[in-house]
Amino acid sequence: MAVESRHAEVAPPVFLQLAGNPVRWRLLTELARSDLRVGELVAAIDQPQNTVSYHLGRLRAAGLVSTRRSSADQRDSYYHADLTRCGELLASTGAALHPGLSAGVRPAMQHDAKSTLTARRRRNRNTRKVRVLFLCTGNSARSQMAEALLAQAAGENAEVASAGSHPKDLHPNAVHAMRAYDIDLTGRRSKHLDEFAGQRFHYVITLCDKLREICPEFPGSPQAIHWSIVDPAAEGGHAAFRRVAADLHTRIAFLTNYLGIPATPTTRE
């Protein structure tokens, strides 16, 4: 009885305490898909702003959510779910319940059945190529890097393009940063988003807060996703471009998984 009592007093893992709240779970669900502002989260989950702000504060304190000042409106901020951190806490949650639920440990029959089901789902979702368009202002760094990373990860499973509202020459630091992922951007052309007017995409992903505000509509109602990523050219230097490349690499790894595309391993310096 003493042992049972001791176990009964153990608090649930951090992720369960945080995500177990219905409001926080809905916030994480929304932010797992796209970076959003407080007002957009208020509308998405139909909760008062003070309630949303309180729960966002709890998620930020735990490192599950981060925030960045909008480059379009300095009075506003975008919130972003750290899916890597969520995954780490989920793994530790399983291990806390039972060692057999730790990452990489599964009974053979269960693993085989899950692998078969996953492969079947991927085949069903990839009966046609996914078309993705990345957009930023200059098409000189962020969107070019994102296009190249997704094209590398998805291979023949996707058609990927990028463009900008005010195209500028490809930034040399973007070329340098992509070499760590075995990608050569040399000679790539920056394109105006008008070149893709009238084309159909499954996903249109904006990487620039300013462009999101003026993003045109595309036929077929593609799913709109926003990644609020700082312009590395504004900071300058190789380090800023490497940080953006790492951020994009992580986001695209989750995106390919979401699309049912088996990601191709990439290298990093």
Image (tube, helix red, strand yellow):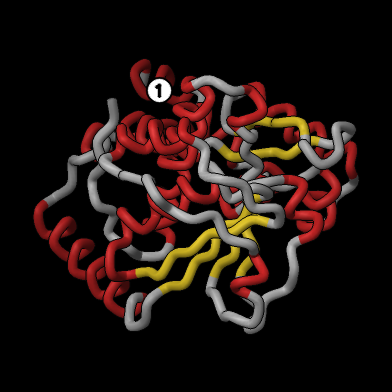
Residue 60 coordinates in the image, percent (x, y) = 66, 27
Residue 195 coordinates in the image, percent (x, y) = 61, 72
Looking at the image, residue 86 lies above or below residue 128: above
Question: Mark 1: few, some, or many residues within 10 Å (few <14, many ≥20)?
Answer: few
Q: Quadrant of the C terminus?
A: top left
Total numbered labels = 1
For residue 176, which quarter of the picture?
A: top left
Say which amino acid is labelled 1: His
State the residue at coordinates (47%, 45%).
251
State the residue at coordinates (68%, 49%).
137
State the residue at coordinates (80%, 52%).
40
* Residue 223 visible at all: yes
For this view, does 262 lie left or right of residue 128?
left
Looking at the image, residue 95 lies above or below residue 215: above
Residue at the left extreme, as displayed = 108
Secondary structure at numbered mark 1: helix
Mark 1 lies on residue: 7
Residue 174 coordinates in the image, percent (x, y) = 46, 36
